[in-house]
Image: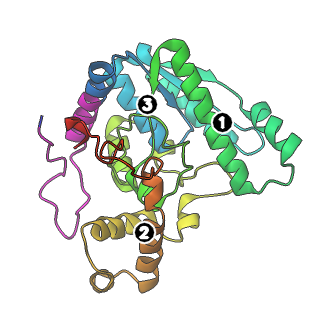
Amino acid sequence: MSVPVYFAERPSPEAPLAINPELVADWLVAFLKSEVIGRRGFQNAVVGVSGGVDSAVTAYLCARAFGPEHTYAFKMPYKKVSSPESVAHADMVIRELGCHGREVDITAAVDGYVMSNEPEISPSRLGNVCARTRMIVLFDQAMKIGGLPIGTGNKSERLMGYFTWHADDSPPINPIGDLFKTQVWALARYLGVPPVIVDKPASADLIKGQTDEDDFGISYHRLDMILHHLILGYRSERLSQMGFTPDEVARVRSRLDATHWKRHLATSCVLSDSAIGEYYLRPVDY
């Protein structure tokens, strides 16, 4: 199966990230069926729904691919940080799809470690503990129902290293991992994700009041355009000529380069000609 042209039309300098959302949706549904059912032999999908647009889009795609009866959505709030709005929006996704829904409160699990061992933990470290605890829940619940956890990280977050290593990136399948955030928004509107979820400021919901764009210091619309051109090989000078400030370009390039290691599995020292992931590759790995 060849890779489809998922752009709305031939990319132009004015709209290089415009997509054909219908084609993207169909392709991602086919991808999920092929990878989850065909290649791995699972029937059920397990998705952590945060109330944000990325997890909502993933849940909508899973419901299309496997049916609501085979889609299991888990809310996993940490009550001291997670906003009630996020929980309400996650409930909205579950209700709209008619899929299985369950809340697993991770507060006691997180505090069991934090309060007993690290009572002075920083907000960012606490956020990482929450993210990794959620993956424990998802993988255990997947084993319970005979399903597979499905990832929800978009391309913008992945390129910026804006995720918790061995947490958000842990699920073995990620349908939206090659879509920039602005493309996820376009796909969400096509899929019928409620506008209140699509239009609200993006947030990891790990620290009260936190938003992605505040952390980046740049809007997603400008970030995605810079990332798009950087990974195509454009030099910083050319991006400045396109209207991006030197500070914006330097900020994005710095994080892109500094977080490259997060987009790979653990680095092993190569000692033989059969090192896994280095020399030992199956045809599909190429």
Q: Can you give x and y, in whole percent of width and height, for residue 102 in the image?
A: 61, 21
Which stretch did the figure color magenta? 2-31
Relative horizontal placement of residue 278, taking residue 209 as reference (left or right) = left
Give amino acid for label 3.
Ala
Q: Which residue is mark 2?
A: 257
Q: In the rendered view, how is the structure colored? A: rainbow
Give amino acid for label 2.
Asp
**Circle 1: element type:** helix
**Which sits in the foreground, 154 or 63?**
154
* Cα–Cα span, label 1 and label 3: 20 Å
Q: Can you give x and y, in whole percent of width and height, for residue 15 in the image?
A: 23, 64
> In the rendered structure, does residue 9 fall within the stretch colored magenta?
yes
Categorize mark 1 by other alpha carbons within 10 Å: few (<14), some (14-19), many (20+). some
70 versus 250 height, above or below: above
Q: Which residue is mark 1?
A: 133
Q: Give residue 31's quadrant in the image.
A: top left
Residue at point 29% right, 40% down? 280
Q: Which residue is mark 3?
A: 59
Q: Give residue 40's quadrant in the image.
A: top left
Relative horizontal placement of residue 198, taking residue 132 as reference (left or right) = left
Q: Can you give x and y, in whole percent of width and height, for residue 137 in the image?
A: 62, 27
74 versus 279 height, above or below: above
* Cα–Cα span, label 1 and label 2: 28 Å
* Callout 1 touching callout 2 (CB < 8 Å): no
Residue at point 30% right, 27% down? 35
